[in-house]
Amino acid sequence: MSLATSIRRNVALFLVGVGGVALSVANASAQPLDAALATAYVSNPTLNAQRAGTRATDENVPMALSGYRPVVNGSIIAGFDATNARTTQGNAYANTWPRSFALTVAQNLFDGFVTANSTEMAESQVRGARETLRNTEQIVLLQGVTVYMNVIQAIALLDLQNENLLAFEQELRATRDRFNVGEVTRTDVAQAEARVADAQYGVSQAVANLSSARAAYRQVIGVEPGKLSFPRSIERMIPKNVGQVISAGLASHPAIKASQFAVDASLFQVKVAEGALLPNLSLQGQIAQSYESNMNTQRTGNAAVALNLTVPIYQGGVEYANIRQTKELLTQARIEVDVNRDTIRAQAVQYWGALEAAKAQITAAQAAVAANTLALQGVREEWRVGQRTTTDVLNAQRDLTNSRSSLVVAQRDRVVAAYSLVATIGRMDAASLNLKVRNYNPVVHYNQVRDSWAGVRTPDGQ
């Protein structure tokens, strides 16, 4: 077998696994990406905090509905009264123990539609909070993908740097051997030593990068990274062109929907503010009983029912300022919808371009790896027979390491860009990704508290 044939055979064997070897750190017990995302879905503090915030927003509805319900107050008064009176008949002394209790009930009949509009506003806030929660879920899961792939990339790059260091150390030993027999100069040895030092620096930097990647993984996922595996492709979930990505994102991205519900809430807030200019009508009833209110009265009972109509005339102008303020907030909310749409449109174009670029970079990097592998083997053989210099060998080894590193980075970028596009179209959630978790349903808590009239304990539901 000729030298050229042997080199080509070795390159062919290398290329069989070049697509997966660059980022492969998996074995049978490796933790897949889906499992890591499921862990983050359950335990990520940012996501759990947003869930708590969504539950808190649910309470706005029963607070608004309280305007339809009666207000009941009870009061009890008890004391001591000592009276000393001087009259024409003489002095009079009396000690009494006045005491009374009263039960008051007030029922709103008309409040300028404040309660109705407050309820609609609260319902819009709840729907917006659910979309905000869904957006937070997307952000957290995308962060999970990113840190997962960053750890895989960091491990692969560290392995490449270690291989590079080992190769340069072998070249240094071979160069020193040839120097000892007078085949190369001291300059060749110095060049090899310099490349070893550079490779040692590369290893230390890769170790530091891996440490940072593992820390970020722990922060997002909630556990230390174990043995990871390269994820399966998610590109089947992505529309066929960037125009469809933009359309899907504008139609279903939770950030846009949340801002639209914020517009609805702001609109009802304006109506609530305008209700301050309308009259209020309420029905009030009271039952009262008093004892020893004075020296001559032992007991007094009272029952009363009254309609109370309040017509606002002027309250210092605060209600007008409040109306103007809520209208400006409504304008702001409408503008924020356009801002979110522009953001999603830009992200769609950005991530689509990143995905296409990563695909092209992978193809180019694979070709570069193949070519540089062949070149390195050829240069080494030519160096052994004196047709190449030490510098040629060192440069060839460096070029191969760089091209393999580029392949690692491109493979990582392709995965992250694909998942970023899935998030852009609003499908980066546990249900769409088929994560093996119990999906959090915010409607459960809402239904538990919406019509609650009393109670201070939080529900046992989600």
Image (spheres, helix red, strand yellow):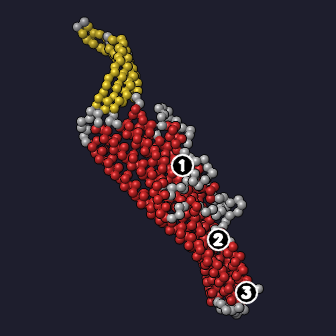
Q: Residue at x 31, y 25 (%)?
A: 307
Marking on residue 406: none
Marking on residue 19: 2
Residues tagged 2 and 3 counted as in contact (Cβ below 8 A) = no
Q: Residue at x 27, y 43 (%)?
A: 320
Q: Amino acid at mark 3?
A: Leu
- Circle 1 sits in a helix, a strand or a loop, which is it? helix
The mark lying in front, picked from 1 and 2, is: 2
Disc 1 crowd, CA 10 A, few/some/many (<14, 14-19, 20+) = some
Where, by quadrant of the figure, is residue 179 drawn? bottom right
CA gap between label 1 and label 3 equals 62 Å
Can residue 423 be seen by looking at this rendering? yes
Q: Nearer the viewer, residue 461 or 245?
A: 245
The mark lying in front, picked from 1 and 3, is: 3
Q: Earlier in the sequence, mark 1 or mark 3?
A: 3
Q: Residue at x 68, y 89 (%)?
A: 382
Residue corresponding to mark 3 = 3
In the picture as drawn, the residue positioned furthest to the left comes out as 88
Q: Position of residue 396 (x, y in %)?
A: 63, 83
Disc 2 crowd, CA 10 A, few/some/many (<14, 14-19, 20+) = some
